[in-house]
Structures are given as structure tokens and as C-alpha cells.
Amino acid sequence: MTDELTSSYDVVVLGGGAAGLSGAVTLARSRRSVVVIDAGQPRNAPADGVHGLLGREGMPPGELLERGRAEARGYGAQIVTGEVRTARRDGDEFTVTLTDGRSTRARRLLVASGLTDVLPDIPGLRERWGRDVLHCPYCHGWEVRDQAIGVLSSSPMSVHQAMLFRQLSDDVTFFTHTAAEPTGEVAEELAARGIRVVTGAVAGLEVEADRLVGVRLADGTVIAREALAVGSRMEARAGFLADLGLKPVQHPMGVGEHIAADPMGRTDVPGVWAAGNVVDLSAQVGAAGAAGTMAGAQINADLVAEETRRAVAALREQVSPEVELAEQGAEERALG
């Protein structure tokens, strides 16, 4: 079901994953008019289930989103399928335009558009991503426990990633790929944990019966592996924010680009909040949802403050003529 986009809302939520839907529920429960615009490209779509989410352990990602949409609609939020082309300042509000030409206005924006995983250019990685090529030990680690696990050196966090997967299996191999071979303290730590280091570029994967069975090096050597952990470069989906002057910046840990926001989700652009993976590149579903809830609450509070200021100004305008008339009457009586 897709709702019809209307002309204006209190809040437009850009992205309908855990963060966006949680923010929408919070806002709708506060009786705000809110629409979620979602392109239908969730980051975790390849995964079989969501893990580490209390009460929803193992639920397929698509089912979780359907439940979230139903809950948001139950409080009056709208869910619109579409891809945002631009978001622009329009006086005190914003105009959001979709790629199909539709547009709407909003008093506030909540950016929850997530991120894109950019993988190393190795044949087969993308096709097996979220299955036996994975990245997060907390999202997928239990499912590959005690297996032969490989870790590809592909990000500044790859050694740390290897250490975390070592907690789950005694058989972990670290592939340096195009990076330098670990030396010094790092090499000592890997050796102490029994993590084998294999040098040389990785050329591809060996797959049999739709299962990963090995990692193939450029020299033809195949190292038997049942799972491969890869640290992607994570890039915020935020190109549509350029007209607002809000652009992704390098993440402090060097793992990609994100939209900077304070702990409440407020960005440097007045009226724009952000939550979920577009801000916190490593956030799991639960953390992303919590961030969306927080941002939604902050947006509602900001709108309440604005409405209160306007109400006070209107009251003063109403009272001022009455005071002037009363003072004028008092002067006339004194003169009479």
C-alpha cells in the first residue's frame, strides 16, 4: 500500500528503515502530520534475519519493515514510495522534490536515508553479501560460529574485525589482500590469538552448491573458508541534501562518510535532523530505531517551542489594543 503525497506536512521523513519509521511513529503519536518517503532499498535486504533486536530476533528484514509501516500508519502517518531528488529551503519551510516530479512542503525534515556499502572490487563479493560474505560479528557472527572464517583487510578496522570474529571461531584467517602485512604489535596480537595471516591479493571466491567454500588468491592458491568478513566503505545516502548545504563528511574512524549530527540528531542546518546509519555508520537496527525515536521527539519539541512563540506573539498583539483602549478611557475620565 502506498499513500498519496499531499501538499504539506509538519515533518517529512526521508527514508523508511528502522530510524525513519521509529521517528515517524513518535511524531504521529504526538499528533504531527508526517510522511515517510522511502525508495525501498534497505541496506539489510540481503540478510535472512535481523539479529540483536530484543523481541524480534531472527525476523526477516522485510517483515520488520512491514510491521513498522503498519504501526506508523496506525497513528496517521503516511508512507510514500519514491526517491528524493532534492530538498531545498523555502522560506521558513522546506520543499522536497521526488525524481518522478512530485513534491511537498515540510516544516521540519528528518533524514533517515541510511548508507551504501561500497565493497572491494573482487568478483563474487556483492553476490554473496549478507549471506556468507558479511561484515558485522554482532549481526551475523553467531550464524557462522565455529566455521572456517576469513577476514579481508579492506578497512582501518579490519584487524579489530578479525579479533571479534576470533571470539566466535578458533579457525580465523586474515587476508592482507592489497594492504601491507601486519608488523610489530599488531602481528604479535594476531599470532597470540592464533589468527593465520595470508599475504597476496585476493582474486575471487570459490562457491559450490551456492555455498562459499574458499578464497582464491591471485596466484591461484585457494584457502578453504566457509565465511568471509569484509569491512565495506560506508557512504551516507545524502546527495539530495546538497542544496541545503548539508554534505557527508569523513567519519572520524576512517570507515566512510556520514552526516554529522549532535546526540539528539540535530544537524548544522536549522530544521533538519538526521538519524540511523546516515549518521552512525555502525548502528544496528535497534540503535538506529532508538536514534529515530530521539530525533522525532526533539523535532516535536522544537515545533512546540515554535508554536508557543507564535501564540505568545499573537496574544500580545491581541492584548496591546485592549490596553491602549483602557488607558485612553482612563485619561478621558480623568480629564472629564
Image (tube, helix red, strand yellow):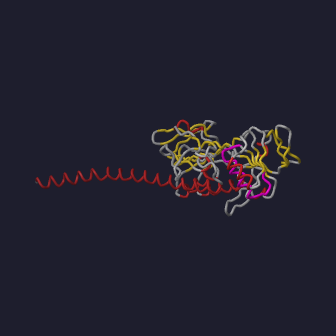
Question: Which quadrant does the C terminus fall into?
Answer: bottom left
**Left or right of residue 291, residue 130 in this image:** right
Residue in the picture at 45% in, 39% down: 91
**Residue placed most toward the observer, 201 or 50:** 201
Residue in the picture at 71% in, 61% down: 57
Q: Does the magenta stretch include residue 224?
A: no
- Asked whether the viewer can see residue 140, the reply is no
Toward the front, the furthest residue is 184
Q: Does the magenta stretch include residue 164?
A: yes
* Residue 333 point in image, percent of width and height: 14, 55
**Residue placed most toward the observer, 255 or 35:** 255
Toward the left, the furthest residue is 336
**Left or right of residue 167, residue 8 in this image:** left
Please report the bounds of the magenta region as a residue range: 154-172
- Asked whether the viewer can see residue 231, the reply is yes
Residue in the picture at 71% in, 43% down: 154
* Residue 307 point in image, percent of width and height: 43, 52
* Residue 120 point in image, percent of width and height: 73, 40
Up the image or down, 8 lies above or below 65; here it is above
**Left or right of residue 93, residue 22 in this image:** right
Toward the bottom, the furthest residue is 55
* Residue 30 point in image, percent of width and height: 52, 57
The number of numbered discs placed on residues in the rendered structure image is 0
